[in-house]
Amino acid sequence: MSALTVSGLSVAYGAAAVLHDVSLEVRPGEIVTVIGGNGAGKTTLLKTVAGVLRPAAGRIAVGERSIAGRPAWEVARGGVALVPEGRGIFGDQTVRDNLLLGALARPGGRGASAPQIDRALTHFPALRERLDRPAGGLSGGQQQMLAVARGLMAEPRFLLLDEPSLGLAPLLVREIFAVIARLRDEGVTILLVEQMAAQALALADRAYVLERGRVTLSGPATAIRSNPEVVRAYLGSVRAR
Amino acid sequence: MGRAGWAAVAVAALLLPLSTSNTYYLYLACSVGLLTIVAAGLNVLAGFAGQISLGHAGFYALGAYGAGLAATRLGWPLWAAVPAGMVLAAIVGAAVGAAALRVSGPYLAMVTIAFGIIVEHVLVEWVSLTGGPGGIFNIPKLTVGGSYWPIAGCAAAALWLTANLRASAWGRALLAVKSSEVAAESLGISAYLARTTAFTISAALAGLAGGLFVLLNGYISPDSFTLQTSILFLLALLFGGLGSGAGPLVGGAALTLLPELLTGLADYRLILYGSLLLVSIYGLPAGVVGAVGARGRKSAPDTGIPHPALSPEGRGVETAGEVLLGVEGLGVSFGGVVALADVTLTVPAHGITAVIGPNGAGKTTLINLITGYYRPGAGEIRLAGEPIAGRAPHAVARLGVARTFQTAQPFDDLSVVENVMVGVAGARLGALGGALLHGPGTRRRERALRARALQLLAVLGLAARAEEPAASLPAGLRRWLEIARALATEPRLLLLDEPAAGLSPTEIAELDSRLTALRSQGGPAIVLVEHHMELVMAISDRISVLDYGRVIAAGAPATVRESPAVIEAYLGLPA
């Protein structure tokens, strides 16, 4: 099994540079988290890895195979599944159809059978009861669950989760993190981008702190947890007047 | 098209009837004139205000039948009948516009198609009035040579009036609405009123052309006023150049003359039109005029004119400690999801009040509620004691509330200085007639607006770029421009939605010093929504923290920075 490596990655929107020389690695079987405040560039990082955005410079590779600049659908079929920020549910279609669409990116073929849907729903009993309802009618928490389940339908080698806690009430945040923990225990490799640093660090094996588009801290999650610099990265420091 | 180009066209137009008495050529020239008039009107609607109509053959028909019936049934002379048709088209245009412009974009196009079809069918069915499919014969008419002068004169007038309009506060307001309706509303412009005005002007010019069509032909029937005619009108404008001064003339000439040059293809005219449409959309997105690059130069600013400051119109002056904005118990939900609940916020008349919080906390929603873009479900919003909750964005803006947007929204079709002029003028667009005729009052106002805008640009360090199109500015300067435009309305309260987003560290340092300077110079009260914590902590006088739509902390930066609730909101709690 090969790792997902990002090295020297820079991304810009027009003239505005968002990521500067970002490097990280996700090895099979681990959960790696990227934390940081709003506007740090977390979502940009995931979108670039998933092929939604094109990098200005740098390398993104699965094993030895470079995927930088490849179109998103090709990256998805290569085993890198993005669960986007804001969920990106197909609201007009049923929960089942959303899951079947997720299976299109499976390596080796299209379509999915009932057992596969069954397997993807192991951790999401609420979705099982609503398989034939339009996904747009689900609650925010259920939609997030569906987005994760849809990502799993592709049987990806790397699951990219972009702020799964966003917009969810604290109870649901706890629930979604519990699901992520169970996926990890099953051996799914996860790159988790989160603003909720404490929860993400409690779960992850290793962590990177992103600040204004640069990696300012990295290391084992336990070490990052006790580093006071993390609070400063989020809340800044007060200027003396 | 430059000055020389227009002079050449004018000379050619004057010489044509003197150099030939061939009625075929003169008739073609008249047809070019008619199409130019309609396209000039459509240019106001589509090129300036950004709305597409596929029903202008209906207004063309109203002008033609109005003039024809006035001449035959009422026995009016042609010089009265033609304007009567134009007035009829304008009145119906105002009514249709007022009703239809609640929708815009593709929906408006659909509504106008329906309008055109209804007019066409009324012409066919109302036999006693319109003569049915046979139409109206024997309308008194002029010879082709005699029609030439009124038509050429009206075409010249249409081009001149619409060019004047473009250069006035009205024209800038229309282009502003086209670029960004929400931003235009934030400066006090009613997008609905602007669009309806544009629609009425375009209907009036289509009606005028219809009346002149009667003058030229002396015979009208429903066949001349079909959906295909409407499409031809729009095509002439798109082919010539949407929004450009010479576009209507170039497009009118091309679409009249090309089919004549290709008479062998007579039966394939529709294919030709279709191909032209494709060519103009793919090959010439800015039309022939845009492709030739002959853009009209804007006159240089008159530097010799004194700067008459536009005084803020009798707005109350608050003292430092007074509450300017009071938000009480504010709540709103979207589709059952509570976005804000029981939010209380007090903004004094001076200084910087920051509103921070994690993603999705409801900060932008709060700004949208204060500025009238959303209606609150509960609670009060008071500006200097006056309740403003539930008012339209442009109405709130007129009370002295300015804002910027998370994604900077300068008006890309306007120059930098024009952008600021939209802000200076705000809702005060001046008389429409004066704008069309470029009267002395309008000229004076224009100079004052420009002078004031240039002053502001100088203060904000944008003076060197004043005449550049806003679209050419780099990201950082687009932000400045948006802030300059908001300040141009001389607001009491300025709401900035993530002004540092996408700025480089140097630009952020500059933003820091500018906002600090604005505060110390007694500028408006500022509400700052921002994620860049170093900036927030550095320049804010007080901070309110939102989380899950509720205020979880409020106070001085140092206090908020240490608050356990705030740290938890941002970093979460370990499970």
Image (tube, coloured by chain):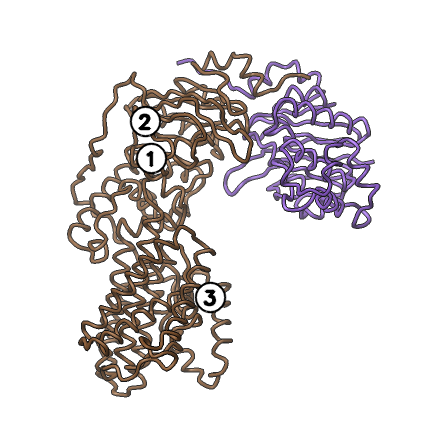
Which residue matches tag 2?
Answer: B383
The Cα atoms of the two marked residues, 1 and 2, are separated by 9 Å
Residue A86 horizontal/vertical position (percent)? 60, 36
Q: Position of residue A25 (x, y in %)?
A: 72, 31
Q: Residue A226 at what x, y percent from top left? A: 66, 13
* In the depicted structure, whether residue B489 falls above or below residue B57: above
Element class at badge 1: helix
The residue indicated by pointer 1 is: B396
Q: Residue drawn 60% across and 18% down? A: A230
Find disc 3 in the rendering and name its residue: B280
Dot 3 falls on which chain? B
Q: Earlier in the sequence, mark 3 or mark 1?
A: 3
Q: In this view, does B386 lie to the left or right of B527?
A: left
Query: Residue B48 versus residue B61: which sits nearer the camera?
Result: B61
Q: What amino acid is found at the position of numbered circle 2 in the picture?
A: Leu
Tell me the quarter of the image containing the C terminus of chain B: top right
Give the number of the mark in front: 3 or 1: 1
